[in-house]
Amino acid sequence: MDKHQIREQVFRCIFGIGFQTDVDPEILINQYVDDSCDAALSNADRRKITEKALAVSRRIPELDDRINEVAEGWKTNRMGKAELNILRLALYEIMYDDSVPVKVAINEAVELSKEYCNDDAPAFINGMLAHFAV
């Protein structure tokens, strides 16, 4: 899998765990990777998806606080779930993943929003993340 495909699987994991808040995220993430990812997925790619999804899920309260600091009129509790989880993933990459340049994190978030969100989302995502591209 390339980096975009791995990122997309991580997004799907963190999106999915938001619907089952009564279950340990680690269990849900492992179940998603086992059930939904290609059977031919390498062990290294499985590990990358699982580790990043867990890392993001553990920082959701902190990421949401940071998003809410810059959000005007659209706090996290009012955002679409796809948009919110794309923002969480990108912000995690910006703040904690030194292997991902800020511009790449933003561009990938915009690309994911084109695929999973409405037509207004790419501009919204780009505008929100621009606050963190300092």
Image (cartoon, rainbow, N blue to C red):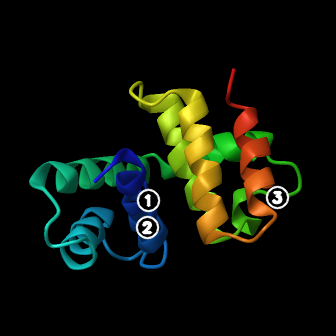
Residue 125, given in percent of the width and then of the height, sits at 72, 51
Residue 12 sits in quarter: bottom left
Q: Secondary structure at mark 1?
A: helix
Is residue 99 placed above or below 121 in the rendered structure?
A: above
Mark closer to the observer (2, 1): 1
Q: Give the quarter of the figure containing the N terminus.
A: bottom left
Q: Nearer the viewer, mark 3 or mark 1?
A: 1
Furthest-top residue in this view: 134
The residue that label 1 is drawn on is 8
Residue sitting at x 38%, y 77% = 22
Residue drawn at x 52%, y 30% is 95
The residue nearer to you, when weighing 129 against 76, is 129
Q: In the rendered structure, are the residues bearing label 2 and label 1 in contact, judged by CB atoms less than 8 Å apart?
A: yes
Q: Which amino acid is tagged 2?
A: Arg
What numbered label is drawn on residue 12? 2
Q: Secondary structure at mark 2?
A: helix
Q: Is residue 90 left or right of residue 99?
A: right
The spot of residue 100 in percent (x, y) is 45, 31
| Of the pair 78 and 125, the residue shown nearer to us | 125
Q: Is residue 20 above or below residue 9?
A: below
Instruction: Confirm or deny contact between disc 3 and disc 1 (CB under 8 A).
Output: no
Q: CA distance from mark 2 to mark 3?
A: 22 Å
Secondary structure under the numbered disc 3 in the rendered image: loop
User: Is tag 2's residue or tag 3's residue first in the polypeptide sequence?
Assistant: 2
Q: CA distance from mark 2 to mark 1?
A: 6 Å
